[in-house]
Image (cartoon, rainbow, N blue to C red):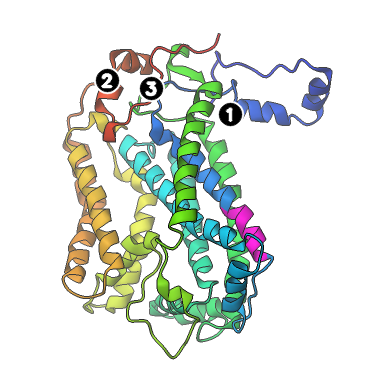
Amino acid sequence: MSFPWANHYQPKHPFMKYLDERLPLPRLVYNAIGGGYPVPRNLNYFWNFGVLSGLALVLQIVTGIVLAMHYSTDGATAFQSVERIMRDVNSGWMLRYMHANGASFFFIVVYIHIFRNLYYGSYKAPREMVWLLGLVIFLLMMATAFMGYVLPWGQMSFWGAKVITGLFGAVPFVGEPIQVWLLGGYAPDNPSLNRFFSLHYLLPFVIAGVVILKIWALHIPGSSNPTGVEVKQASDTVPFHPYYTAKDGFGVGVFLLLYCFMVFFAPNYLGHPDNYIAANPLSTPAHIVPEWYFWPFYAILRAFTVDFILPAKLWGVIAMFGSIILLFFLTWIDRSPIRSTNYRPLYKPFFWVLILDILVLGYCGGAPAEEPYVMISQIAAMYYFAHFLIILPIVSAIEKPLPLPNSITESVLHGEEKESAPLGAGGTFGNVQPAE
């Protein structure tokens, strides 16, 4: 994001001048998060979740590295090694609970981040590459979380691995070889643990690399904002530091309070009790479910119960993966020239119905595979695809949007963004002027 009014890094100390000439790291940091990076002045607290997702990733990497020092990938000792971490390793119980709950908090902030992008149209040009890289991160997160869920080698870990990898077997011709390659055999065992542990350890660093690409892509067009109006003048922006570093600092504080509450007072609330039972291939749990953040996709998978041309299981796999792949084309599906849903009165109620629909899918995904949950899942899955493939294109073509403000400054001074922000979110900086 390059503006003629942006402050430029000018080192004053002789050592900093020397370093800037040979390794311009301070310049890079200053231009990325300092006074050299102008940001729209009307960002609300929904823009905190990008930083929070980065913090969650760092917590997962740090705690994961320490846990890996004590974990055994042998099927005969994997469960016992986790118990040893909990009981004998200094602060091992805290590290494990931080890592397990950190995964849930990572998905919470990423889901909110995705919904913010959907509401404010941040997936539209010229930021489509930022959106696409974000979806790549989301897919890598899902793969990492699934492989990590297998590692404790409890009952839910074992049978979850068997069920999820079994989905690949539904794919004609190539499905079974892929399933055998993933497991290292025909059932989860030692080779599976070795493969999943290696990939679970590696993928977070791949995610970190894609995050760097995403930040790089974001700095080319600059940050979006609640109005969807592009920056036009110096008064539309403020320096990222100190205004948004302070704002993000507040968000980090709230995040850490909630995170610590879960770690110390409700560490197993988001887990499954069957995973404290050692894996037993001869005893199938009554109700096999993945972690809660997979429930909406699991509900879509189970919504297909009748063979029609293709087996129902294959239809479920196609729909489950299709529900994510569909988001990659959202930039071109939504043809509305207006970004922010605040100014799209016809589309706004459909957006909130979509959010409710995803929550219903999540509830059904965690429920037993019986009626009425299967029927509700089928209806909710149909609406999910109808929203993106039918409703959104039609609404984009016939909708008459509300008039947009002439500039970001105008929306701030007139209070328009505050009045129309979703969920009561405010967080504008009022009449704060950018540094000269």
Tell me, for residue 33, which label it has, or none.
Answer: 1
Tell me, for residue 363, which label it has, or none.
Answer: none
- Return the disc, 3 or 2, that comes first in the chain's sequence: 2
Residue 430 is inside the magenta segment: no
Mark 2 Cα-neighbour bin, 10 Å: few <14, some 14–19, many ≥20: some
Q: Amino acid at mark 3?
A: Thr
Tell me, for residue 428, which label it has, or none.
Answer: 3
Q: Could you tell whether 361 is left or right of 149 in the image?
A: left
Q: Is residue 205 visible?
A: no
Cα–Cα span, label 2 and label 1: 28 Å
Query: Which tag is nearer the camera, tag 3 or tag 2?
Result: 3
Q: What residue range appears in magenta?
A: 60-68
At 40% from the left and 27% from the top, the residue drawn is 43
- Residue under numbered circle 2: 416
Q: Secondary structure at mark 1?
A: helix
Cα–Cα span, label 1 and label 3: 19 Å
User: Is residue 55 depicted above or below 361 in this figure?
Assistant: above
User: Is residue 358 depicted above or below 371 in this figure?
Assistant: above
Q: Amino acid at mark 2?
A: Glu
User: Is residue 44 depicted above or below 168 in this figure?
Assistant: above
- The spot of residue 135 in percent (x, y) is 45, 50
Occupied quadrant, residue 310: bottom left
